[in-house]
Amino acid sequence: MSLISTQAGETGLVLEHFFPVRPALIAEVAAAPALPLQTFSEPKSKGKAFLMSLLLPGLGERYCGAARKSELFMGTEIALWLGYAGFITYREWREDEYHSYAVAHAGVDPAGKTETYYIDISNYADIDAYNAAKLRQRNLADYYKDVDANYWKWESDAHRVRFDQMRLSAARADNRATFVLGAIFANHLISAIDAVWSVHRHNSKLAQRLDWDMRLGDGMIQPKVSFSLQVRL
């Protein structure tokens, strides 16, 4: 026989089938304990998911079972960090290259020199031309008073131009590394927000979840098998 029953907030479907069994099995079946009610999952915490993905993109998505999005955010994070490391390595290599180039072709002493100094020597043939320009501009703040310590004189204008190209190449790599850092921050933030949304969807699905319960035996002469499905609305 079959029975369909409805209760407040719950719809249940119970199927019962009676069948004869050997007397020796009656006591064993009747005494069998009911299997516990099984559920699909537990509700997840939005705050926990947010913090997990803020720390490591994709971790909050994995926490609530969104495996594909988790792999996407984690893969993006790895790619961005590899890109950042690549740009930083290239920048450092180009910096070493143009520093050595200035020593070889302009007689520069690299000790204690700032990036501003290297910008200055890329724009003037020698320190005398630079200081003369600052005097004309009445810009004594940027005037190199210690000529010996800050001396440079390019062998040719072609060497100066080549130096400037190497310096600009390093500067572009540094700018791109900074941009990638911004993208890494954005990836963390976007993943954290997406993790909250993923938890919201996960918990919403739990509002309409399917539970099942199976019981064997009723303690009567003939045992019964009862199987029920419940959908919580």
Image (cartoon, rainbow, N blue to C red):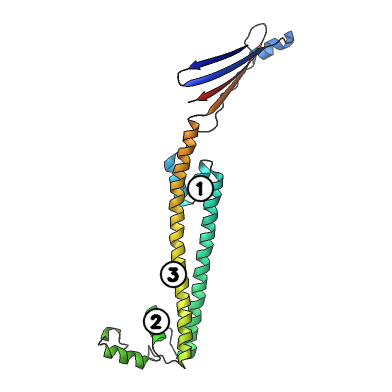
Q: Specify which label sits upstream in the sequence, 2 or 1.
A: 1
Q: Amino acid at mark 2?
A: Ile
Q: Residue reaching furthest left?
A: 138
Q: In terms of sequence position, does the residue under pointer 1 or pointer 3 come before the other? A: 1
Q: Is residue 194 above or below residue 34?
A: below
Judge from the rendering whether residue 72 lies leftward or rightward of residue 113; answer left or right. right
Using residue 184 as the reference point, say whether residue 2 is left or right of it: right
Q: Which residue is mark 2?
A: 119
From what the image shows, is residue 176 above or below residue 123?
Answer: above
Vertical side of 188 occupied by 162: above or below: below
Point out the frontmost of discs 2 and 1.
2
Instruction: Please indicate whether residue 96 sits to the left or right of residue 134 in the image.
Output: right
When the figure is inspected, residue 223 is found, relative to residue 145, above or below; the finding is: above
Q: Residues within 10 Å of mark 2 (few under 14, many from 20)?
A: some
Element under label 2?
helix
Q: Residue at x 67, y 14 (%)?
A: 29
Calculate the distance from the C-alpha at mark 2 to the C-alpha at mark 1. Answer: 44 Å
CA–CA distance in space, label 1 to label 3: 29 Å
Residue 233 circle label? none
Whether pointer 3 and pointer 2 mark residues with C-beta atoms closer than 8 Å, the reply is no
From the viewer's side, name the closer residue of 6 and 184: 6
Query: Does the rendering let one see residue 81?
Result: yes
Quarter of the rendering containing residue 18: top right
Q: Are marks 2 and 1 in contact (CB under 8 Å)?
A: no
Callout 3: SS: helix
Where residue 88 sits: x, y (%)? 49, 69
Q: Which residue is mark 1?
A: 59
Which residue is labeled 3 in the image? 175
Amino acid type shown at disc 1: Leu
